[in-house]
Amino acid sequence: MEERRQFVDNLVRAGATTDQIARLAQRQFGIERRTVDRLLVDLKKLLREELLAADSKVEQLARLRNDLLKMRTMTKQPHAAIVATEKLIAEIEGNLAPRKLQHDFKGAVPDALAAALSGMTAEDLEALAQEQLELEKKAAAIDTTAEPAASSEA
């Protein structure tokens, strides 16, 4: 029975619907839908107890995850509500906005550049230098002091 409960728990946490869980459990263990429904009820009780045993921010996340669990185990899943709840969870956890990463490249960049250049032939270096000169000429030809063209609105 524990193996079945763990199987259902893993599927719920992976976001499977009740119908998917029932089909997979039938194939895996030969159990009926009502047995799966009982396992889901037991699982919800256990998860509810686990999730409600924390403080403020964690309690918010627990309630949201509990709601998310309920939505995912519904026969007809409210997909928009699931997405909104997952977004809110990410916002509370601080995962919604990209995190600013700071790197220290003091030794890495020069070392990598030296390694790349040391593997190049004289012809490759000459071609690289010519390409850089052409790019600099193109950049110099662009007039950055000119004002943008006036719009033709009347």
Image (cartoon, rainbow, N blue to C red):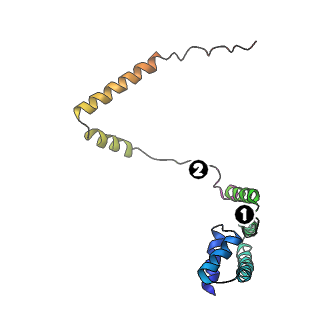
Q: Are marks 2 and 1 in contact (CB under 8 Å)?
A: no
Quadrant of res 10: bottom right
Residue 107 visible to the viewer:
no
The residue furthest left is: 122
Work out whether 120 lies above or below 16.
Answer: above
Give the structural element (helix, strand or loop) at label 2: loop
The residue shown at (76%, 65%) is 76
Query: For mark 2, does the 10 Å Cα neighbourhood hold few (<14), some (14 to 19), or many (20 or more) residues?
Result: few
The residue shown at (36%, 23%) is 133
Q: Name the residue carrying label 2.
A: 99
Q: Which residues are magenta?
A: 91-98
Q: Quadrant of the N terminus?
A: bottom right
Work out whether 15 lies above or below 137.
Answer: below
Q: Is residue 10 within the magenta segment? A: no
The residue shown at (65%, 77%) is 8
Give the structural element (helix, strand or loop) at label 1: helix
Which one is earlier in the sequence, the residue at label 2 or at label 1?
Answer: 1
- In this picture, residue 4 sits left or right of residue 120: right
Closest to the observer, 137 or 2: 2
Please name the amino acid that badge 2 sits on.
Arg
Q: Name the residue carrying label 1.
A: 57
Quadrant of res 60: bottom right
Q: Quadrant of the C terminus?
A: top right
Secondary structure that dominates the magenta span: loop
